Image (cartoon, rainbow, N blue to C red):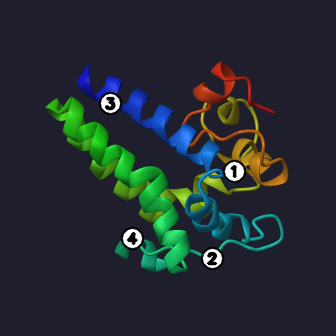
Amino acid sequence: MNMLIAFLVWTFLIYWIHRLAHTNKFKLLTEIHRSHHMIDYFNNDPQYDFRGFLFYFGSSKATLDVIVTITLPLILVIFIIGGNSWHLLIFNYLYEAIFSEYILDHNKNLKGNITKVFAWGDFHLTHHKYPKHNYSLLVCLWDYIFRTAK
């Protein structure tokens, strides 16, 4: 139960951090996140980069974006909730190192009902076309609750 609560709190936090990164209220956060939006996921053929295993995502800003937006909030949640929620740290590492960049999050061929539940493929790429929508990462829940889903 702790892990489910931790997951929900974590995804809630990353939704809001990601949303704040698009407001310009926190200039440093916006600048760091902008590097992620500079990548053309629509016209590039995905090439897996082994450096993801080293938790490096192409540039220092892109790496910092993952750490600030996703990893640090998870560490905070694990510290507060405890229990077996530390397993989420392993999940986060594997997700970011292997699956996130092109297999799930930015896979332009991933469409359909699965992208209405998980913030993958078509759901997340819609955010790249319409940056004021689809802020959720991992699950779409928070965009439906806060009416930012497109």
Mark 3 residue type: Ala
Whole-angstrom CA distance, mark 3 to mark 4, is 22 Å
Question: Nearer the observer, disc 1 or disc 2?
Answer: 1
| Point 73% across, 23% down: residue | 147
Residue 10 position within the rendered picture, expressed as x and y whole percent measured from the top left:
41, 36
6, above or below 55, in the image: above
Percent of width and height locating residue 60: 49, 78
**Mark earlier in primary sequence (2, 4):** 2
Instruction: Classify mark 2: helix, strand or loop.
Output: loop
* Chain-order first, disc 3 or disc 2: 3
Q: Is residue 7 left or right of residue 76?
A: right
Residue bearing the label numbered 2? 47
* x and y percentages locating residue 54 in the rendered image: 36, 75
Give the residue pinned by disc 3: 6
Name the quadrant of the C terminus: top right
| Residue 145 percent coordinates (x, y) | 64, 19
Q: Nearer the viewer, mark 1 or mark 3?
A: 1
Residue depicted at 74% across the width and 30% down the height: 148
Query: Whole-Å distance between the Cαs marked 3 and 2?
Result: 32 Å
Labelled pair 1, 3 in contact (Cβ < 8 Å) = no
Q: Which residue is mark 4?
A: 55
Label number found at residue 22: 1
Which residue is pictured at 24% across the width and 39% down the height? 78
Chain-order first, disc 4 or disc 1: 1
Amino acid type at circle 4 is Phe
**Image vertical order of residue 113 relative to residue 60, above or below:** above
Number of other residues with Cα within 10 Å of mark 2, as a class: few under 14, some 14 to 19, many 20 or more: few
